Amino acid sequence: MLPIHAVLEPLKAALSAGAAAVLAAPPGAGKTTVVPLALLGESWLGGGKILVLEPRRLAARAAAERMAATLGEATGETVGYRTRLQSRIGPKTRIEVITEGVFTRMILDDPGLDGVGAVLFDEFHERSLDADLGLALARETQGLLREDLRLLVMSATLDIGGVSRLLDGAPVIEAEGRMFPVETRYVGRNPVERIEDAAARAVMQALGEETGSVLVFLPGQGEIHRTAQRLAERLRDPAVDVVPLYGALDRETQDRAIQPAAAGRRKVVLATSVAETSLTIEGVRVVIDGGLSRVPRFEPSSGLTRLATVRVSRSSAEQRRGRAGRVEPGVCYRLWDEAATRGLVPHQRPEILEADLTGFALDLARWGARSTETLALLDQPPAGAFAEARKVLTRLGALDEAGALTAHGRRMTRI
């Protein structure tokens, strides 16, 4: 029995009585795979589909496969998934797990969301630009076209009250977490030491001190491959498998990382922040956190978006630490000093405050909105960045002088 089962009845009652609800549930509570299945039989759904939005392709596929397995089916039957590069949807599919970007395209193509009874925004605390835009557009659809549409925002670490106010005081249901005790060990890192050297050193220490599989958080695939090389030079235990995990990998390699280690073997999973939420990696009881993540940063001076390596937020560090306590008591090694934890920002800044807004402005123009003031957004985009995005679109011929979408702009939205 997962913690989420204790709040399923209050959640069902809230969605029966109103059009929106907020579910606060920490990682490991079971919200991603239990809630959609639990809502399938609700009378208000009326045979419509449930859309479950995930921030990443890997999480979408894994969630769909877990739910399908629960039903004893293959994906593409009752439960399917749709991402930018893959689709497993059949004529009987009632639950579609999709990425947030796919949802934006769906609602722009069909503002009425024909055949959809509910939209579930999972891991909303990650505050991606697509998630913020998707919720704002879904809220407008609900208010103007589809009073019967249900919206559920599911989050682990977020200002839940703010989301509730955004949804006109939607009820908040809170689930308890299920986490075993996790011991935190600060092993530090010399500022001149490369992250892959520090990570490899910590992996060797953890393998010597602890049992079970190890999950290592690194900022990107370059660091993952270099850490794997360091470990290949140092590891002498043939029973330890080193496996990478990031979004661009092929499906077979991703599955090797997610599945439990074979009997008598241990696994070291070298992962990006893709493993922070949504995914459960079987058998992990040791986490090594490099304390870094790679995020997009828009530079107005150049008009380009670059990937910046930044320190994680406190909430991300806690989510990573919690991965060690999913199945039994665990250990988290942090590659920084304990005092540095106080210097971490509480949460990463929402993408809407940092990103290039050109695509966002183009989508809004296609929606028919020329400003963002009336949209249900937790954070308004910076006025200067939004104005500059519209100027770029005008120069490209996507918007006319009055700010309306042109035929050329409409073709651009299809790319």
Image: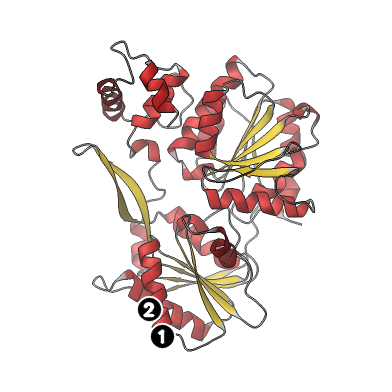
Percent x, y of residue 243: 51, 70
Secondary element under disc 1, as helix, strand or loop, is helix
Q: Quadrant of the N terminus?
A: bottom right
Question: Where residue 156 appears, x then y in whole percent?
Answer: 56, 48
Q: Classify residue 196 by image quadrant.
A: bottom left
Q: How is the image coloured?
A: secondary structure
Report the quarter where the C terminus lies. top left
The residue depicted at 38 percent of the width and 31 percent of the height is 359
Residues packed near mark 2 inside 10 Å, few (<14), some (14 to 19) or many (20 plus): some
Residue at the image point whose x is 65% and y is 83% from the top: 264
Along the viewing direction, whichever of 411 and 354 lies nearer the viewer: 411
147 to 4, vertically: above or below: above
Tell me the kind of residue under disc 2.
Answer: Arg
**Residue 148 in view here:** yes
Q: Is residue 229 left or right of residue 249?
A: left
- Badge 1 local density, few (<14 within 10 Å), some, or many (20+)? few
Identity of the residue drawn at 49% across and 25% down = 376
| Residue picked out by circle 1 | 234
Q: Identify residue for label 2.
A: 230
| Spot occupied by residue 320 in the image (x, y as percentages of width and height) | 49, 61
Return the residue nearer the eye: 314 or 189.
Answer: 189
Q: Residue furthest top?
A: 402
What is the CA distance from the residue labelled 1 to the residue labelled 2?
6 Å
Residue at the spot x=46%, y=55% of the render?
Answer: 248
**Amino acid type, mark 1:** Arg
Q: Give the percent coordinates (x, y) of residue 215.
A: 51, 69
Q: Closest to the observer: 403 or 347?
A: 403
> Does the CB distance between marks 1 and 2 fall below 8 Å?
yes
Q: Is residue 188 visible?
A: no
Is 313 drawn above or below residue 21 in the view shown?
Answer: below
